[in-house]
Image (tube, grey):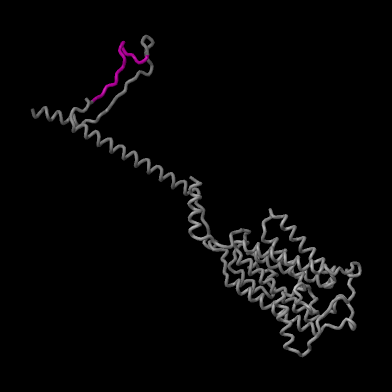
Amino acid sequence: MAASELIQDNCDVRPHVEVNVTTVNPPTGHPPGVANGNPIRLTSLSPPPTDAHDGKKQHEGSKLSSLLKQNQLVHSLSSGLRRHCNYVKITVPEERANHLPSEWWKTGVAFLYALFILVFTTVIITVVHERVPDKSVSPPLPDKFFDYIDRVPWAFTVTEVNGLILVGLWLVQWLFLKHKAIVARRCFFLIGTLYMYRCVTMYITTLPVPGKHMVCAPKLYNDSTGKIWRILRLISGGGLSLTGSHLMCGDFLYSGHTVMLTLSYLFIKEYSPQWMWWYRWFCWFLSASGVVCILIAHEHYSIDVVIGYFATTRTFWWYHTMANTHALRQAPNNYLSRTWWNPIFNFLEVNVKTTVPIVFSWPVALPPSCRQRYRIVEGGRDE
């Protein structure tokens, strides 16, 4: 009895192996799959399990094999993902992580600089007005443009209307720019610098009025209170003839209207995409027609407009050449760095490491709840 149990136990631990026997090249006298006239049968070296203990072992073995297969599958998938991630990994230098910081406080400094210069310009205009020679003593200087083009009284109104449209368009465009802080401080700095140049030129050389049609306010001489009221009136009216605030003469060299018309167009063109060519051409037409109408109205000498145009365009191009070419700032033979405003430029642009891209965004950020709903909608759309 013990010997039979021992034999039974030895038979239980034998592996379950199945053998499938087939003929590779069957003989010609018999049909395929037949040997000695009898079909081939599948045989097993071990008999099927006869008790519950053997069935339990087979169940556990099948579970173990399925777990091993699942583990191998997960391992192969994870290794494949790791290999895929290695192919698409892109290393970004740390110095480019924050290459376009907003720095609104610098924009505020540039705004105060432009505001101070504009107020100082009204003071200089008031001072120069007292030095303008009388028309009866010093007649208008000869001007070649005036010799061929007669004066059109309403032309200067077209100039100021075009200027207001351009400034309004630029303001709306600036509001939708993503990097509006960087662009704004560039605009404020250039406005302040160009009007400071204008203060110097109209103070050191006072030209007579360009036409006998011009009506200048009476001189106040030593009346300081009256001069202060004139300054405040000029500031409140924006220095425009449309508002009736500009009744003083002497601010001819160079033209402030030319500066604003040209500078507005340059900023609109620089920070608008190329596919908006129709928008650029429309703004160019407003700027060019406004400048021409200054001469048609005989409100400035031709030299005033020419110098205003050259001073505006060259200063704008010099500044943006240095701003958009980062390697040029550190070059030893960079003659553009010899300008007097180069230290101010370094202060404003030191953290701007690349060209400012033309990217638009909503001027007012959406509430967090709206952003969350937007993400949910986008996620559902992707699915």
Q: Position of residue 242 (x, y in %)?
A: 76, 72
Q: Residue furthest left?
A: 1
Image side of residue 168 versus residue 159, left or right = left
Q: Residue furthest right?
A: 147
Q: Residue at x 61, y 66 (%)?
A: 182
Instruction: Tell me what residue is drawn at x 70 percent, y 77 percent.
Output: 236
Q: Position of residue 62 (x, y in %)?
A: 28, 35
Of the pair 220 and 177, the residue shown nearer to us: 220
Query: Relative to the observer, which residue lies in front, 341 or 274?
Result: 274
Tell me the quarter of the picture where residue 63 sits.
top left
Visible residue check, residue 153: yes
Examine the rendered structure and indicate whether residue 274 appears above or below residue 223: above
Q: Residue at x 76, y 66 (%)?
A: 161
Q: Is residue 42 magenta?
A: yes
Above or below: residue 319 compared with residue 85? below
The residue most toward the top is 29
Q: Is residue 234 above or below residue 367?
A: below
Q: Quadrant of residue 132?
A: bottom right
Magenta region: which residues?
A: 32-45
- For residue 317, say whether it is visible: no
Quadrant (top left/top right/bottom left/bottom right) for the N terminus: top left
